[in-house]
Amino acid sequence: MSWTQQFIHTERGKFEVFVKGQGPPLAVTHLYSEFNETGDYFADSFTSTYKVYLINLRECGESEPAHSPHQLSLLETVLDLEAIRQTTGLERWSFAGHSTGGILGVVYSIYFSESIDAQFIVSAAGREYMTFSPQCIYNENHPDFKTMQDLIEKLKKSDLSHEKRKALTIERTKLSLYRPDLYKEIFNKNIEKTMSATRMSFFARELHLFDVTRKLQLIDVPTRIVCGQHDVQCPLPYSIEMAEYIPHAELIVFEHSNHYPHLEEPAHFKAIIARAFD
C-alpha cells in the first residue's frame, strides 16, 4: 500500500498530507523535511498500528507558503497542526515526531494536550542542545562538527544535481548512525525526500532561544520518549530531562542506536509502538 496524497484546506491555508495505514489517527511531521508519495522511514514504522497523516508544513512540498517569517516558528506551526486536525474532523489524534519533529511534538502537547491521545517523542529535546553539550555534533568541540556543517551548507544549495544531493545526504546521515557501515542495509527503501532550506534556516535561529523545560509539566498526554544511547544530534541527557519533567512519560533507551533508533533497532521500536499505553 502506497501513501495517498490529500490536500487539507484550512482557515490557515492549504496543506499537503500523505495518508497510509489502518487504526486510530496519528500525525507525523518534521520541522523542515519535504515529503512525497514515497513516504518516510519514521512514519512507515507506525502504519501497521495507526492511520498515519504525514504532513508537509509551510514551505514544504505543495503546502501553503509562509506569508510572513513568523509563520515558520514552532508556535505558529503548532497552530497549523491544530487547524489541520480540526479540518479533517478528528476530535483527537496521536502524534509522533523524530528529531525536530519530536521538538515540535513537545511544543504541540504543551499547548494542545486536549487534542492528543498519546505521543512518541524520538531523538529530541525540550531545549537548545548544542551550546553546552560537547557530545552533540552541532557543538564546536565535537570531532565531527566541521564535517557536519560543511555537508549542511552544501545541501542548502538549490542547484545541486539529484545524484550529488543524494550522495551528500548519505554522508550526513552516516555521521548519526551507530553502525555507519550498515547504511545500505538500514536505508533500503525507495524513499526520496528533501528538506526546506527556508524552514531549516529559520529553525537554526529559533533554536538558540528554544527552552520549554519549565513548561514540560503542563503536558497532559501519555508520552513515550525514545532515544539512542549514542545519539550525537540530540544527546541522551536531553531525553532523560524531558522524562523527568513530563507527567505520564516513559523513557526507553536504545543501547545500540545513535539518532535513528526506529531504523537501527526496528523490531524493538515496533514493539514499543504496538504496546498499549496505560
Image (cartoon, rainbow, N blue to C red):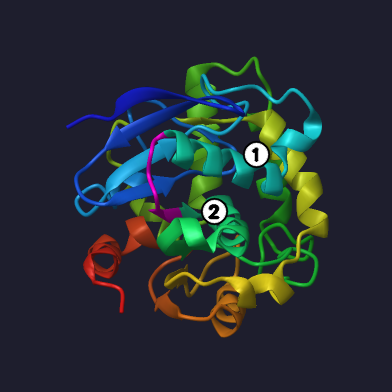
236 in the magenta segment: no
Residue 11, how many percent across, how many down?
A: 58, 27
In percent of the image, x 40 and y 38: which residue is there? Answer: 54
Extent of the magenta region: 88-96
Residue 55 image point, x, y percent: 46, 36
Provide residue 186's location: percent of width, then percent of height. Answer: 31, 50
Q: Residues within 10 Å of mark 2 (few under 14, many from 20)?
A: some
- Density class for disc 1 (Cα within 10 Å; few <14, some 14-19, many ≥20) is some
Tell me if label 1 and label 2 are in contact, CB under 8 Å.
yes
- Given residues 79 and 134, the one toward you in this image is 79
Specify which label sits upstream in the sequence, 1 or 2: 1
Label 1, secondary structure: give it: helix
Q: Residue shown at 56%/71% (left/top)?
A: 219
Residue 259 seen in this snapshot: no
The residue lying at 46 percent from left, 80 percent from top is 248
Image quadrant where residue 237 sits? bottom right
Which residue bears the numbered disc 1?
Answer: 151
Location of residue 46 in the rendering, given as x and y in whole percent from the top left corner: 29, 52
